[in-house]
Amino acid sequence: MAIEPSHDLIGRDSEWGRLTEFAKSGEPYSSLGIVWGRRRIGKSFMLQDLSEQVGGFYYHALRGSSAEALRDMGEHLGKHIGAGAPLALDTWDEAVDALVALGRDREMLVVLDEFPYLLEHTPALDSIIQRAYAPRGKTRRGSRTRLVLCGSAMSVMGMLLTGTAPLRGRAGLDLRMQPFDFRTARHLHGIDDHMTAVETYAVLGGVAAYAREMVENDLPASSEDFGRWVCRRVLSPAAPLFGEVELLLGEDPALSKVRKPNLYHSTLAGVALGNHAWSSLTKYVNISGSSLHSIVSALASASFIEEVQDPVRDNRPTYQPSDPLIRFHYAVIRRNEARLGRHGVNTEALWGDLIPTFRSQVLGPCFEAMARSWTTHFASQDTLGGLPNHVGPTALTVTNTETGATEPREIDVVVAADDAVAPGGRTVHAIGEAKVGAQFTMRHVRRLEEARIALGDRARSAKLLLFGSSFDDDVRVSSGERADLEVVDLERMYEGD
């Protein structure tokens, strides 16, 4: 019989299915799984729910000394098996053996949540687990424990199964959980109005806890209510979201121990403020490219920024904040922290001054990312003119048909086929522009036509996509008459293909 999740679990059907299959796999031996993802996206909630339903053992690790953690785990294990007293665990070999032994009589889900906390004081713990899960190990063969190691420290969890890591080849499940996409986030937020859903997503993104506990289930009811909500729930120093990004940086081991944390903040600020290209970012941070490389790599491995490949140009990646709240923090909160924290500040008046910044540096870039997400995951092949094998932004030099002058131009969405080894040889299925809060006119259509010409023969049949909230009548009429022009309004982004 299928195991049904709690009614509070939203948008995790595929992850729930994979976890239940792992927990009830029927394998005759003990098995190992990894569940990881950034903090507050619902990993623990889902694992606790499943553990309760199958009678498993869920343990949330302490962040402390090895001896303290062993005592704490012994107490929880003693309660779980009804021993009447804590189990005496003197070493981590004993602790791992005790966990695996829970599955001697039946399939038993065992969850070690916040596993990186244990690695802080016992770096060899993954090697100890490796030994217990040796292919012919007696401990493993005499048990049907389904051991899940879960964690939020992305830089740590991402290395557990890579390269020469002890657990490489031992895990039967490697489940990386992601924040919700903008469509599921709207369902999570419970917002009917499309524009309000976009504005809210530009602040909260798809992180479950940001829409629940951290705002006390208070979300904007309309665009008119958005200002009230953002002032009270995000811009107030008393709001948990106000300092959330700083806390996230401090919690990741790879970032919390760096010698120059200011460079990490500066890099994140640079990306959030629109310095997406490598040359622009090195200029903003004001360090050499070689020095910046290690910083960007650390931030990417910890899921603070993401590298987006250019679909039609080789070795021209751009860098984006991996979460809308990161962009909002560095574009709005951090730059105005002193003003926001002043006693007696009129946050509503200050927000009025910050609205242009929010629209240009937060809402606009977030909407562009939403357009690329829609193109990748929701658009039909008929809409795009082919499969979205490679989707991303690009930069071109185009000829302005009105002035005859050449000018640089950024294209928000490019859809390319996977029909060439090098990006420069790929067929371009579609190009698009994303703009929210402003009206599209035929001038924007001509701009895309100029970009299509600049891309040459490979884009000869490329479709033109306009993503936005407002379109004038000429654009609407033209899209109905032309096979190469698609209008993607907010209703279509949220509900259509």
Image (cartoon, grey):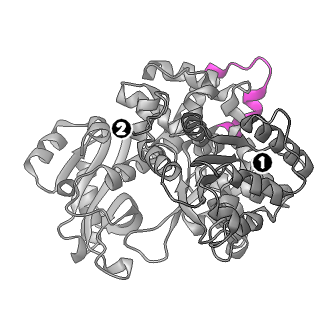
Q: Is 17 left, or right, of 490 in this rendering?
A: right
Classify 10 Å Cα crowding around label 1: few (below 14), some (14-19), many (20 and above). Answer: some
Q: Quadrant of residue 224?
A: top left
Which badge, 2 or 1, comes first in the chain's sequence? 1
- Residue at horizontal 65%, vertical 47%? 111
Query: Residue 401 placed where, x, y %?
Result: 24, 63
Part of the protein shown in magenta:
333-349
Q: Determine the CA span between mark 2 and mark 1.
A: 38 Å
- Residue at horizontal 62%, vertical 48%? 105
- Residue that numbered label 1 is attached to: 250
Tell me which amino acid carries mark 2: Ala
Mark 2 vs mark 1: in front: 1
Which one is in front, 248 or 88?
88
Q: Is 188 left, or right, of 261 in this rendering?
A: left
- Residue that numbered label 2 is attached to: 438
Q: Is 323 left, or right, of 476 in this rendering?
A: right
Query: Residue 258 placed where, x, y %?
Result: 82, 60
Query: Residue 311 placed where, x, y %?
Result: 38, 69
- Residue at horizontal 80%, vertical 44%? 73
- Residue at horizontal 49%, vertical 76%? 315
Check the image and report above or below for 108 versus 140: above
Q: Circles 2 and 1: CB distance less than 8 Å? A: no
Tell me which amino acid carries mark 1: Gly
Q: Secondary structure at mark 1?
A: helix
Query: Residue 362 placed where, x, y %?
Result: 53, 42
Is residue 62 located in the magenta-colored stretch of the structure?
A: no
Q: Is residue 401 visible?
A: no
